[in-house]
């Protein structure tokens, strides 16, 4: 078993990627080269801005090349909760926005001909307990009533074999509008487009200090110094303390994935007849799907730490995978890896421009909570448009956000949150 992401081994960073040395001065410096940063860079470059995209590692190294590749309608926080919290008007706007995020990726992939295995395979949310299936019934009625959304289909346990070759669940909620893609092909495709449009893609350039000067910023990096009129922090789960206001808003948690060796076409068709994106209804949920080359990809965690041993996490994930799919008991695991999610305390994305401290005026976006393939892509594009003055703000800039002095110390509070989630999974 290899302890590296399957995706980048399957599709390594192209040798032809147009990477650059650190420029001295640009209009916009983007810190972080994932979906957020690269979508912003594409829009900015199209408008003629000079842009540098900096990454502490190689381009696309973060979550954007190591995720499950699922594009799910909605956000992490459940829609009825969004209605309660922000009111029906904003609740409806957020739902529409989440669908627009998938449409954005689909349109971008088509426009730029990004060969990243994008497909609207649909998703199946799987009921882990009978009470969860009862909740699905309420949910589907709520979506029809409040959102006029009639696309979801409820599948009871008796018909579940049409959706999944597993006897572990009590039913499923199908949404045909979800999609899947190959994360590494997508992120390297975006980088190729940004580079072609003139963005300077700078690798191994960790920004270690950010300083506001009169009309510009100075970025001290491990490759030298760069000046920029505007700065955009697009580091999500890998955010450090460069701009304290930003770090007080986002914390990181680990997510873990294994893949099997490729399965026979017959077994693939039994386990996932429609190639759905699957996730279950637990707090510590498992998410899984077939990869384009026919492996079972199985992800999740039982602990929010980003420091788990990859062999131990592979063992736990494999055990759970075999409970779900006993026929995979003898299939070898090919890869085990991890990456960091960016989370906020209200489980909402946030995006805007810092105000009021020594790092006033820094653009940022983060907090996609496991929905970032689609959400980070559209947030990044819209952040680029905000910087260009083409739009006033992103929808998430209208949401209040609490920032706490203790947010950066997640290693102290995540064990308690993990224990709470495990307790909820036992009782709820
Ligand atoms: C294991 C896993 C599975 C996931 N599965 C899914 C899924 O199936 N569907 C879904 O929608 N979402 C999923 N996500 C979430 C999704 O991958 C992320 O939300 C999304 O990729 C975030 O993109 P980003 O560009 O904001 O950040 P990232 O892609 O994480 O990029 C941030 C970059 O910033 C760089 N950086 C940080 N600090 C500095 C610095 N000081 N200087 C220079 N560079 C710096 C990092 O090196 C990194 O490359 C998953 C995440 C993980 C980890």
Image (cartoon, rainbow, N blue to C red):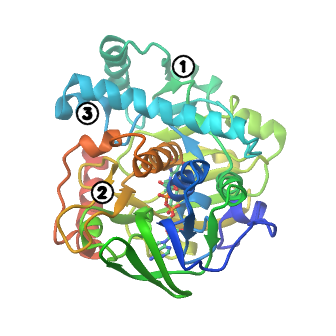
State the count of labels: 3
Give the CA distance from mark 3 to mark 1. 32 Å
Of helix, strand and loop, which one carries label 2? strand
Q: Place residue 334 in its image quadrant.
A: bottom right
Of helix, strand and loop, which one carries label 1? helix
Residue at x-position 24% and y-position 41%: 398
**Residue where numbered disc 2 is placed:** 353
Inspect this view and state whether residue 153 appears.
yes
Tag in front: 2 or 1: 2
Residue at x-position 69% and y-position 59%: 7
Give the CA distance from mark 2 to mark 1. 51 Å
Give the residue at the far front of this rendering: 215
Of the image marks 2 and 1, the number of the one nearer the N terminus: 1
In-image side of 73 versus 39 (left or right) = left
Q: Is 179 placed above or below 256 here?
A: above
Q: Place residue 164 in its image quadrant.
A: top right
**Residue where numbered disc 3 is placed:** 82
Crowding around mark 2 (Cα neighbors within 10 Å: few <14, some 14 to 19, many 20+) is many
């Amino acid at each position: 078993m290899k302890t590296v992401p399957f995706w980048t081994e399957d599709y390594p960073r192209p040798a032809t990627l147009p990477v650059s040395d650190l420029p001295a001065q640009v209009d916009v410096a983007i810190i972080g080269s994932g979906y957020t940063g690269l979508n912003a860079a594409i829009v900015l470059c199209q408008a003629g801005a000079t842009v540098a995209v900096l990454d502490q590692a190689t381009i696309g190294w973060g979550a954007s090349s190591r995720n499950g590749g699922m594009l799910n309608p909605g956000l992490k926080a459940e829609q009825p909760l969004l209605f309660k919290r922000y009111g029906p008007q904003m609740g409806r706007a957020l739902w529409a926005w989440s669908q627009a995020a998938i449409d954005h990726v689909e349109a971008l992939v088509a426009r730029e001909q990004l060969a990243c295995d994008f497909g609207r395979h649909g998703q199946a949310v799987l009921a882990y307990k009978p009470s969860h299936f009862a909740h699905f019934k309420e949910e589907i009625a709520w979506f029809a009533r409040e959102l006029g959304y009639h696309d979801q289909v409820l599948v009871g346990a008796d018909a579940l074999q049409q959706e999944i070759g597993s006897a572990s669940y009590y039913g499923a909620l199908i949404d045909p509008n979800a999609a899947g893609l190959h994360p590494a092909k997508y992120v390297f495709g975006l980088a190729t487009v940004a580079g072609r449009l003139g963005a300077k893609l700078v690798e191994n350039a960790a920004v270690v200090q950010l300083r506001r000067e009169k009309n510009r910023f100075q970025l001290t990096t491990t490759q030298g110094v760069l000046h920029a009129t505007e700065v955009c922090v697009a580091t999500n789960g890998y955010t450090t303390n460069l701009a304290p206001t930003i770090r007080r808003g986002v914390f990181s948690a680990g997510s873990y994935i294994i893949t099997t060796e490729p399965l026979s076409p017959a077994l693939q068709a039994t386990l996932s007849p429609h190639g759905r994106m699957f996730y279950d209804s637990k707090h510590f949920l498992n998410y899984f799907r077939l990869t384009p080359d026919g492996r079972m990809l199985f992800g999740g965690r039982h602990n929010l730490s980003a420091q788990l041993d990859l062999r131990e996490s592979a063992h736990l994930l494999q055990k759970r995978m075999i409970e779900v799919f006993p026929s995979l008991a003898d299939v070898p695991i090919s890869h085990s890896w991890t990456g960091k999610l960016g989370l906020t305390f209200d489980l909402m994305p946030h995006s805007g421009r810092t105000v009021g401290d020594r790092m006033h005026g820094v653009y940022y976006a983060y907090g996609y909570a496991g929905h970032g393939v689609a959400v980070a892509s559209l947030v990044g594009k819209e952040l680029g448009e905000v910087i260009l003055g083409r739009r006033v703000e992103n929808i998430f800039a209208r949401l209040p956000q609490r920032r706490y002095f203790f947010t950066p110390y997640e290693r102290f509070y995540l064990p308690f949150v993990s224990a709470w989630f495990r307790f909820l999974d036992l009782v709820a």
